[in-house]
Image (tube, rainbow, N blue to C red):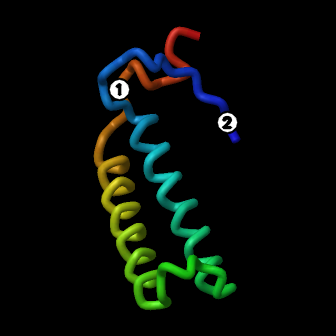
Amino acid sequence: MKVIDNETGTAKLTHRDLALAAYSLAELHNVYVHALDEESYNEEMNKEQMEETIEHIRIAHVKFDTILQSVKPSEDDDPTDGE
């Protein structure tokens, strides 16, 4: 995994933030799908609830990924700038 230097003190939402959110949602989706396949989900959640949760995660990922694809990274986000 690539380490990204990014100031955490900034209040601006960056291209990297969107990328991290989309990636995290994709990974979370994969974990839930694997748990569903293995039938190892929480006792507090039945199969239908698990499938519904997976769909909500998938939709959130699609939304973040769409935003990420629609915005051009700013010059502040370009790691090759100034090198």
Q: Element type at marker 1? A: loop
Quadrant of the rendering where the C terminus is positioned: top right
| Mark 2 surroundings within 10 Å by alpha-carbon count, few (fewer than 14), some (14 through 19), many (20 or more) | few
Query: Residue tagged by mark 2?
Result: 2
| Mark 1 surroundings within 10 Å by alpha-carbon count, few (fewer than 14), some (14 through 19), many (20 or more) | few
Q: Position of residue 48 (x, y in %)?
A: 42, 90
Label 1 near label 2: C-beta < 8 Å? no
Between residues 71 and 16, which one lies in front from this camera angle?
16
Quadrant of the rendering where the N terminus is positioned: top right
Among the 4 quarters of the image, the one containing residue 57? bottom left
Residue at image x 59%, y 83%? Answer: 36
Between residues 41 and 69, which one lies in front from this camera angle?
41
Above or below, 9 against 57 in this view is above
Between residues 24 and 41, which one lies in front from this camera angle?
41
Q: Amino acid at mark 2?
A: Lys
Residue at image x 61%, y 68%? Answer: 31
Query: Residue tagged by mark 1?
Result: 74
Above or below, 1 against 80 in this view is below
Above or below, 26 against 48 in this view is above
> What is the tally of numbered marks visible in this picture?
2
Who comes first in sequence, dot 2 or dot 1?
Answer: 2
Above or below, 61 against 78 in this view is below
Q: Amino acid at mark 1?
A: Ser
Between residues 21 and 83, which one lies in front from this camera angle?
21
Among the 4 quarters of the image, the one containing residue 15? top left
Q: Position of residue 82 (x, y in %)?
A: 52, 9
Among the 4 quarters of the image, the one containing residue 13? top left
User: In the image as oriented, which residue stretches furthest toward the front?
Assistant: 44
33 sits to left or right of 55: right
Q: Element type at marker 2? A: loop
Q: Mark 2 and mark 1: span between their CA atoms?
A: 19 Å
